[in-house]
Amino acid sequence: MTTVGVIGLGYVGLPLAVAFAQEGCEVIGVDLEPRKIEAIGAGEPYIEDVSAEELLAVSGRIEATTRYERLIDTEAILICVPTPLTRNREPDLGPLIGATRALAQVLRADQLVVLESTSFPGTTREYVAPLLEESGLLAGRDFHLAFSPERVDPGRTDFTIRNTPKVLGGLTDGCAERAEALYRIVCDRLIRVSSPEAAELTKLLENIFRSVNIALVNELAMLTDRMGIDIWEVIDAAATKPYGFMRFDPGPGMGGHCMPVDPFYLSWRAREFDMATEFIELAGKVNQQMPYHCVAKAQRALNEQGLSVKGARVAVVGVSYKAGVGDVRESPALKIIALLRDLGAEVLYHDPHVPGLGEFGLRSTPLEEAVVGADLALIVTAHPGVDHELVTRRARVVVDLRGVTRSAPATNVVRL
Ligand SMILES: NC(=O)c1ccc[n+]([C@@H]2O[C@H](COP(=O)([O-])OP(=O)(O)OC[C@H]3O[C@@H](n4cnc5c(N)ncnc54)[C@H](O)[C@@H]3O)[C@@H](O)[C@H]2O)c1
């Protein structure tokens, strides 16, 4: 039986810990937050991708703790801590360095360490390896080290850890083989690349690809707004091409832990190589513009009614950064709410996944109550199960930033 350690029990680490436990592994999960340790111990998951039943079913095989010493008896350790940006939008390796230093204190010979956190090429070799070697053990010789990016798409059920191919790159061939043997337990298809750097860049390419393409359709959405063309109609038509086109939809901007953050890890690293990654910067700029464009659209919609934003009651429908999840990190809805409030609007919201928005002192209002009393309903995130038809029927004016009202055209709806 394999014993696996997971450092960082968040959106990435907890599902991974559960996946290994489901396959019969003993899992030691380490996190700094006692709240999460207690929740796991009580069988109460705090993210959508792990149900209470799943957690309870493996509770005998997952030990959650704040103590790194508990990792001593594990065969492999997966690092899944956050990799955010600093206030100046530069990589903040603080959590990663903290976790790696703490791991170095307890590392022992023959263990496998895999970094799963997204980061720039060179992180595993130039940052993680030397810190772990402070243990006195040599990476690639005394312990194995690899990088394997997590590809989880929170809220998604058709692609899971099991059927999403997993990319990995080892410091040595021996490291890669060891990592392959480990991931074969939970994943059907492994894609081995020649180095940790190739694996690190693979993950960034995937995210940058999305960011750039979303920015492209967002820019077109701003243009079609001026031209009086329906962007959704155009995308629907283009998507009928059987080759050479991949559909991306416009929206209010990018949120979550990955899209608004990861690409800048590469642009920062690129500067060391005298290279400006212009696509990344431009995509970031366009996507960051979107909340402003969306608020301007709301402002115009109110204006059509003879109303100003100041004093208007605006019901925001959906505030998490994507459909089906409750994660509000970097959510464009937060920016939109702040902008509307700055303009003097009274904002309320409905989101079945987000009971409260502490920073705004708001609680989720039942859908009908929220939209009936509002001057404007703003669909920012379209969760499955939310009755958008009711929003169209009951609200005075609707601004739909997700194209969910297309199937039932109505005169009181304005779309992105
Ligand atoms: N969320 C996603 O959809 C997603 C997808 C793919 C990759 N990633 C990447 O995976 C990494 C983790 O992301 P996440 O969304 O799971 O973050 P998260 O914030 O949900 O979870 C990270 C956890 O690490 C813990 N932590 C922080 N420092 C620690 C330390 N020194 N020791 C132990 N625990 C520590 C935190 O308390 C937290 O529980 C990031 O690099 C992210 O970019 C995330």
Image (cartoon, grey):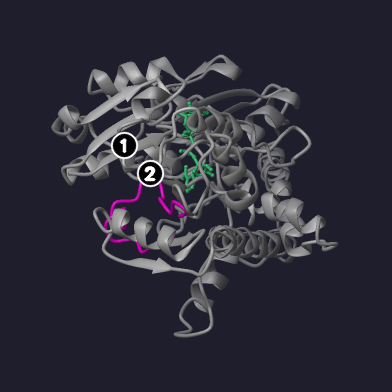
Q: Is ligand 1 less than 8 Å from the beta carbon at label 1? A: no
Query: Residue at image x 56%, y 14%?
Result: 361
Residue carrying label 2:
111
Would residue 357 be counted in the magenta stretch? Answer: no
Indicate the quadrant where residue 392 lies.
top left
Using a 10 Å C-alpha cutoff, classify the residue at mark 2 as few (fewer than 14 neighbours), some (14 to 19) or many (20 or more): some
**Quarter that holds the C terminus:** bottom right
Q: Position of residue 12 (x, y in %)?
A: 41, 41
Residue contact at pointers 1 and 2, CB within 8 angstroms: yes
Estimate the x, y position of residue 272 in percent, counting from the top left: 81, 56
**Horizontal arrangement in the rendering, residue 201 relative to residue 11 (left or right):** right
Q: Residue at coordinates 48% horizontally, 84% vertically from top-left?
A: 241
**Magenta stretch prevailing secondary structure:** loop
| Residue 399 visible, this orientation | no
Question: Residue 85, can we see it?
Answer: yes
Residue 322's place in the image compared with 180, above or below, is above
Expressed as whole percent of the image width and height from the top left, the position of residue 310 reads: 73, 25
The residue to which callout 1 is attached is 74
First to last magenta residue range? 147-167
Horizontal side of residue 258 vs 110, given as left or right: right
SS under mark 2: loop
Magenta-colored stretch includes residue 152: yes
Vertical order, 45 against 187 (above or below) = above
